[in-house]
Image: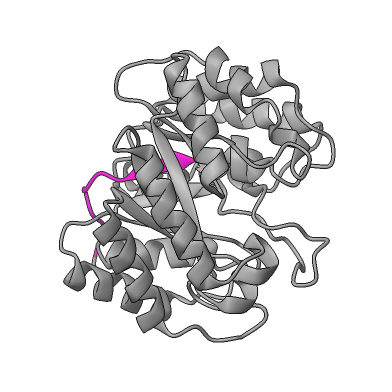
Amino acid sequence: MPGPTTDAVTICECFARDGLQHEPVPVPTATKIELLNSFADTGFRRIEATSYSHPQRVPGFSDASAVLAGIDRRPGVAFKATCPNPRAVSRALEDLEAGHGAEELSLLVSATESHTERNLRTTRAGQWERVTEMVRLAGGRFRLVGVVSVAFGCPFEGAVDPGRVAEDVARFVDLGAAMVSLGDTTGVATPGAVRSMFTRLDHAHPGFPVVAHFHNTRGTGIANAVAALDAGCRHFDTAFGGVGGHPSTISYGAGLTGNVCTEDLVSLFDAMGVDTGLDLDRLAAASAACERALGRPLYSMVARAGFTPTPQEIS
């Protein structure tokens, strides 16, 4: 096992989109804007702000344009919006023309046919056709982020061939994506599988950013993040309080389905000497603000116990 690293990592804060996507009560637009500004103040350089999902299907993001118009823009901070289909990219372009577009767009595929059908209502071939069209529509005006869901295992089909995931990553690379996020949608990844996958992709695409996006369904999210770090990964998706992920009400939802807690991973990385570029005092304040926004304690252990002491502090 490699020792502590001083390499810098980039953490994309996903509370405002992945974190909120299944909340039963929508968070007010003004609160989202306040939170997103606080994330930027904390030092996050990539922030998932919203989704261009159909407003009737996902009413919590019906304010996507208003959120993007309301946040403070600053150099070096990229806000991201999720786009499930070509119509979503058209909406993103409309906001860009209006002067308040996202800097990044996420384009989604699933690694299995069954999850594609349930989640995206099409086939894998059909979704890749959509993605190709979305790239064409985007016209190089956004940084494009490919997303491969169920990359480590599918709730309907079980084990996923790592070769298929590698092929999906290669397709995104060929289409001009700036990075690709691997989603452990139901929290079945293990450190060994993660290390193998990220090592394989680094060999296939040297220097290409592959993002670790783990759900903590089985309590393995942080262990998997460290395994990805050891394999050379320097980009991670997390959400304050460990919220979001996939909905617990669907057929394959069980237990705590949310994302890796931002607070907990940042605390561990900081204690390991890994540079996140984040202000810990502001991180703690943003964590508390997220709990106030949802009106309940969330799942971060660090929010209760405090940040992990560094070796110097322990001694």
- Across and down, in percent, residue 168 comes to 37, 69
Q: What secondary structure predominates along the stretch shown in magenta?
A: loop
- Across and down, in percent, residue 66 comes to 62, 18
Specify the quadrant of the image occupied by residue 56.
Answer: top right
Q: Relative to residue 178, is residue 224 drawn left or right? A: right
Q: Quadrant for the C terminus, please.
A: top left
Specify the quadrant of the image occupied by residue 29.
Answer: top right
| 51 vs 248: above or below | above
Q: Relative to residue 14, is residue 226 drawn left or right? A: left
| 128 vs 7: above or below | below
Q: Is residue 315 magenta?
A: no
Q: Is residue 4 magenta?
A: yes
Q: Is residue 306 visible?
A: no
The residue at 72%/61% (across/down) is 256
Q: Magenta segment range?
A: 3-13
Give the number of callouts. Answer: 0
